[in-house]
Image: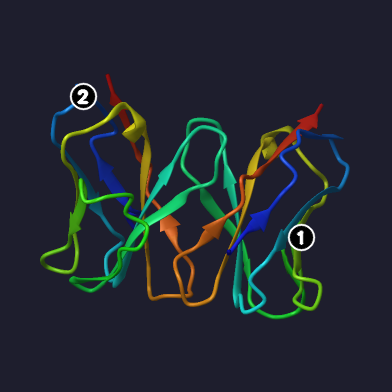
Amino acid sequence: QKEVEQNSGPLSVPEGAIASLNCTYSDRGSQSFFWYRQYSGKSPELIMFIYSNGDKEDGRFTAQLNKASQYVSLLIRDSQPSDSATYLCAVNRNTPLVFGKGTRLSVIA
Amino acid sequence: GAGVSQTPSNKVTEKGKYVELRCDPISGHTALYWYRQSLGQGPEFLIYFQGTGAADDSGLPNDRFFAVRPEGSVSTLKIQRTERGDSAVYLCASGEGLGGEQYFGPGTRLTVT
């Protein structure tokens, strides 16, 4: 059974700190990995995607992928109160996305 | 450019009624997906179109659910004999192909009373 696991949180970090969000997946053949941000009452917004092992940086966001450990993470540097949202991890292997339940992040000013 | 659009944004219907939900994908995107999201859960896959054909409908929960994309652009999700358990946010996403990035519309919140 294909599963994506995330800690539901809430994860609370002070403003300016690094927020670290983690995700594990069960399908070893997964090829594409995505992070979506979802504000309350809104739809998911794609913020990062990664296809290869290692790190990928985009502004304050860094996605990290370790296929051997079946682990993907999202780091948010210099966290801002506007980063407070639910972060959804999603994976696929040429199939529609399989989502985790999301981690709720709260950035405290 | 314009993103994915969905109509209506909210739909309240009585148990047993028929509803149609519409999705207009990003121009040029050949792949279109329907997901359903319940409170506190991640989106769950329903059906995927590549062009006009349903490439994968394995996520449709039962035969009350059906979707079409007759011209390879706009798609309609149809739910017959609605049940209270169908209440959720129905999300549409589009992309350039299977395995690539998917971009979501604002969703339709369906409430079955």
- Comparing B23 with A4, the one in front is A4
Q: Which residue is mark 1?
A: A73
Q: Residue at point 75% right, 79% down?
A: A53
Secondary structure beneath label 1: strand
Residue B40: image tag: none
Q: Position of residue B8 (x, y in %)?
A: 23, 35
Q: Is residue B75 visible?
A: no
- Asked whether, in this view, residue A18 is left or right of residue A80, the answer is right
Q: Residues within 10 Å of mark 1 (few under 14, many from 20)?
A: many
Q: Residue at point 18% right, 69% down?
A: B72
In this view, B55 is above or below A74: below
Q: Position of residue A83 (x, y in %)?
A: 69, 40
| Outermost residue toward the top in this view | B113
Q: Which residue is mark 2?
A: B15
| Quadrant in the rendering for residue B3 | bottom left
Q: Amino acid at mark 1?
A: Ser
Q: Residue at point 61% right, 45% down?
A: A101
In this view, A97 is above or below B50: above
Q: Is residue A43 visible?
A: yes
Q: Residues within 10 Å of mark 2 (few under 14, many from 20)?
A: some
Question: Looking at the rendering, in which quadrant would you find the N terminus of chain B?
Answer: bottom left
- Asked whether, in this view, residue A55 is left or right of residue A99, the answer is right
Residues under labels 1 and 2: Cα distance?
42 Å
Q: Chain of mark 2?
A: B
Q: Amino acid at mark 2?
A: Lys
Q: Chain of mark 1?
A: A
- Comparing A31 with B100, the one in front is A31
Secondary structure beneath label 2: loop
- Comparing B17 with B6, the one in front is B17
